[in-house]
Each structure stands twice: as C-alpha cells, then as structure tokens.
Amino acid sequence: MLTSEMVHFVHQMQYYILFEVLECSWDVLIKQVQQAEALDDIIAAHQNFLLTVKAGALLDDNSRVCHFHNSLTLRRLMSYIYMEHPFLMLLDHTQRRSTVGRTPLDE
C-alpha cells in the first residue's frame, strides 16, 4: 500500500513539475523572447525562466525548509522500501515453497 502511495506521489510531482512549472514557464519565456529587442532582453528572460523553474520545483532558497522536510521524508520512505522488499521476497519464496507439489484439488 505504501509503495503505491509513493509511486502516486512521484507521478504527481512529476506531473506538477512538467506541466505546471516547466510548460507555463516555457510559454512565458517564448513570449518574452519574441518581444525582445536586444540580446540583453533574451538573457534576462532566460534568467527569469531559470529562477521561476527553480522556485516552482521547490529548489530555491525560499523552499529550503520544504526541501529539508521532503528529503527527510524521502529517506524514511526509501528505508521502508529497502526493509519491505526483502520481506516481500521472503513471503513470495515461502508461498512458493508451500505450494510446490500441491494441486488446486488439495485446497
């Protein structure tokens, strides 16, 4: 259950960053580049794009607390996965051993 929730979380974060952050920021960048009159305008638009994407992806200085909290949460989740995986492998192996040589009629 937790694994599927983590996969869902990762997919939602990926969707958010791709479509809400990158796509919207890209549209703004293209409009600013098309309206640019000098190279400095394009450089400023690109710098603004990078800052917007960094903030939207929660990687800027204002998001450090969130980043710290997310990294702790991620570490806990990863340690759970590493503990859960061997257990599931053992459970699968045990179930296979208990059904070796049995037929559906034995149940």
Image (tube, helix red, strand yellow):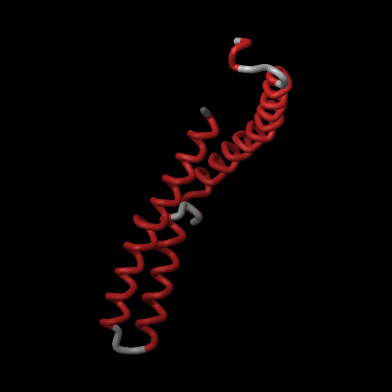
Q: Residue at x 67, y 26 (%)?
A: 92
Q: Determine whether, in the image, residue 19 is placed left or right of residue 62.
A: left
Instruction: Name the residue furthest top.
Output: 107
Q: Residue at x 69, y 24 (%)?
A: 96
Q: Position of residue 44 (x, y in %)?
A: 39, 77
Q: Position of residue 90 (x, y in %)?
A: 72, 26
Q: Residue at x 63, y 34 (%)?
A: 81
Q: Position of residue 11 (x, y in %)?
A: 45, 46
Q: Position of residue 32 (x, y in %)?
A: 30, 76
Nearer-the-camera pick, 30 or 35: 30
Q: Determine whether, in the image, residue 90 is placed left or right of residue 48.
A: right
Q: Residue at x 73, y 21 (%)?
A: 97
Q: How many marks?
A: 0
In this view, 11 is above or below 102: below
In this view, 85 is above or below 102: below
Nearer-the-camera pick, 13 or 64: 13
Instruction: Name the residue furthest bottom.
Output: 38
Residue 107 figure quarter: top right
Residue 18 figure quarter: bottom left
Q: Determine whether, in the image, residue 78 is placed left or right of residue 53.
A: right
Nearer-the-camera pick, 94 or 85: 94
Nearer-the-camera pick, 27 or 62: 27
